[in-house]
Amino acid sequence: MKKAIIIIAAFAAIVVLGFIAYIFLASPKVPQAFIDGHNEFVALQKEAFQLSDLTSMPEMEALNTQMASEDYSGALKSVESALARKKDASAKLDSINSKLAELKSISGEITNSEIKTGAENFIEVANKENVVKINYNNLQIQMLEKLKTMIGILVKNPKAISAADEKTINDLSKEITDLKDQFGKAEGEVDKIQSRYKEVEKEFFGLAGLEISK
């Protein structure tokens, strides 16, 4: 009888341990809050891109036509609208910083050390990516502000520009050219860090057994 009790107790212990192991393996590898936070982060990225992509802005296409036809008042409105979009993009990029800080905090709740390290790596690279994007967006804001000043002079004096205003326009034009030279470098940095970001994000989500939000 005593032997039977020992066997039953041992069997029960094995069943309990097996159930605990099942619960551990079947439970989510990352907190739901982290998954939700990542989805919000991706949404912010998309919104920031839509607001900050100068090449797809209808205002910039209109600007070229307006400048060619000497519609300086219309051109000024287009630049002001583009600037408003870029500043909205700045706000979104700042929100991304805050969201990544939240993800960093939540990642501390991940119990699997390998997955936790993967999450921290992906967040670190995402932070670097956002810094590069903020820099690129700021360069474009600077360019648009200088362009706004130039067009503002033309709006006030479309036919007769003073020597002082002409010098101001020439100086601003040179500064814009210098900024455009910086765009090339900034674009290269964005491409490089985005490539790295995709790698670490894919690695983390593979470890966590999750699908990357698109």
Image: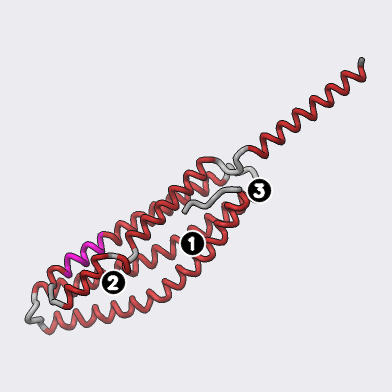
Residue 17's spot in the image, x, y percent? 75, 31
Q: Residue at x 50, y 48 (%)?
A: 103
Residue 51, given in percent of the width and then of the height, sits at 32, 59
At label 1, the amino acid type is: Lys
Residue 80 belongs to the span the image colors magenta: yes
**Horizontal and vertical percent for residue 68?**
17, 78
Please tell me which of labels 1 and 2 falls first in the chain.
1
Q: Quadrant of residue 158?
A: bottom left
Point out the tag, 3 or 2, that comes first from the N-terminus. Answer: 3
Q: Is residue 27 highlighted in magenta? A: no
Check disc 1 and report the residue beneath it.
Answer: 128
Report how far apart the C-alphas of labels 3 and 1 lie in the structure.
Answer: 23 Å
Residue at position x 13%, y 76% from top? 70
- Percent coordinates x, y for residue 128 in the rendering: 48, 62
Q: Quadrant of the N terminus?
A: top right
- The circle drawn on residue 113 is 3
Toward the viewer: 50 or 108? 50
Dominant SS in magenta: helix
**Region of the chain picked out in magenta, as a range:** 75-84
Disc 3 residue type (three-letter):
Ser
